[in-house]
Amino acid sequence: MFLALRYLKPKRTFVSVITLISIIGVMLGITVLILVISVMTGFENELRKKVLGFEPHVLVSNPEGVLKDWQPLMKRLRETPGVVAASPFVQGPVIVEFHNQRLAPKIRGIDLAQEEKVLPEISGSFIKQGKLELKGDTTILGIDMARMLGVHVGDKITVYSPGNLGDVLNVIKKAEKDPKQLETLKDLVLPTDLTVTGIFESGRYAYDSEFLLVPLHVGQELYGLEDSLHGISVRTVDANRASEIRDAILAKAPDGIGAETWVDMNRNFFDAVAMERNVMFFLLMFIVVVAAFGIMNTLITVTVQKTREIGIMKALGATTGQIVWVFLGQGMVVGLFGNATGLALGMTLITYRNEFKDWLARFLGIQVFPADVYQFAKIPAEVVWWPDVAIICISGFVICSLAALIPAYAAARLDPVKALRQE
């Protein structure tokens, strides 16, 4: 180790420059790996939280239509082991109009008292303006939808539902032959005016820009369901046991009833994130591999320069193992320094990631992390020391050590007589 550190002492030589570049290469590789994997982990966990904050653990519905006699089913669901609460809902697309601004979001008709048991998160910091109240002809909008429409608490919005589209088309055909049917058509397309009592923010753009909550009876009226439902939301004792409890629900449910877990409904998101995370790890690990080739190049150069010293040490009785450890020690020290500085820089960038993102956006004049694409206002990140950070650092160190092993073994195999004769 004494000789390894002595050879690594900075001198104004080309070898010392290559050594410095190698350390910087390892540092950047470790930094980028820690940063990217932590952001991907944070993104996955934050997505999980946002999904569970707005969607039930299990959604029970009729794949072929609506739920008509749903009260006995609701009672059976609440008696299923592992089910904490159940709540009826109506959900579907509508057209919303306010001051000649029109959007096509989705309504979610709920019984607020029962919904709060299924999604207790909506009782917390869910409401940003107004209050959590759904009585009569009222609604609560997502914050991004309210911004796009220019709506504030207390305003009235007009909602048109496509729920009776089939009836409308039938009346239009009759009106072609009988003009008196136009009065019937006016009744069918009569819109509903709803008063905005609150504006919510879930933290996920897909929800905040596409959903408005309405009382259950309003949703049923808009879709002409009478007392029927589109489905029943279920909360379980543990979100991770949702699949097991879903199977128990289906075992007791009548024929024709289907059920999906929150994982089933968002499988594409989670599978894509998991795949990207694994692919990014292997791709970015090549940065460390490239840096390891720099270490190998440095040690090969040092081996050539130190041919005489190697010959002298072997002539004095140095073993092959001792010579190997001199050069292997150099590679390990470079790897250790690269890991330590990379870890420090990576943790710094993770801590100030959003400040760095804002500065980069101002400096480049572009939107670095658009919320409408990634569905988060800020860059999420979560550092998992084991196994993520540990695997990154250990892998980087092992790669650097293996890169040093080849020139170290070549140096140890030098014949002392030939080495001294060359000098």
Image (tube, helix red, strand yellow):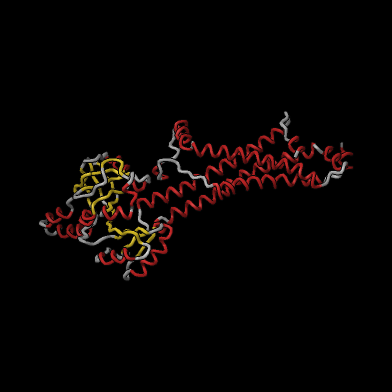
Image quadrant where residue 97 sits: top left
Count the marks. Answer: 0
| Camera sees residue 254 | yes
Image side of residue 418 versus residue 347, left or right: right
Image side of residue 212 versus residue 32, left or right: left
Residue 301, given in percent of the width and then of the height, sits at: 75, 38
Return the residue nearer the eye: 255 or 234.
Answer: 234
Residue 299, given in percent of the width and then of the height, sits at: 74, 40
Return the residue nearer the eye: 159 or 141.
Answer: 141
Q: Residue at x 37, y 57 (%)?
A: 57
Task: Report the residue that reaches farthest toward the top.
Answer: 12
Q: Residue at x 28, y 43 (%)?
A: 199
Image quadrant where residue 216 sits: bottom left
Q: Is residue 423 above or below residue 122?
A: above
| Camera sees residue 109 | no
Q: Residue at x 42, y 49 (%)?
A: 47
Image quadrant where residue 11 sits: top right
Residue 204, given in percent of the width and then of the height, sits at: 38, 46
Q: Is residue 346 above or below residue 174?
A: above
Image side of residue 277 versus residue 291, left or right: left
The quarter of the rendered structure image containing the C terminus is top right
Image side of residue 82 versus residue 321, left or right: left
The quarter of the rendered structure image containing the N terminus is top right
Residue 418, given in percent of the width and then of the height, sits at: 88, 42
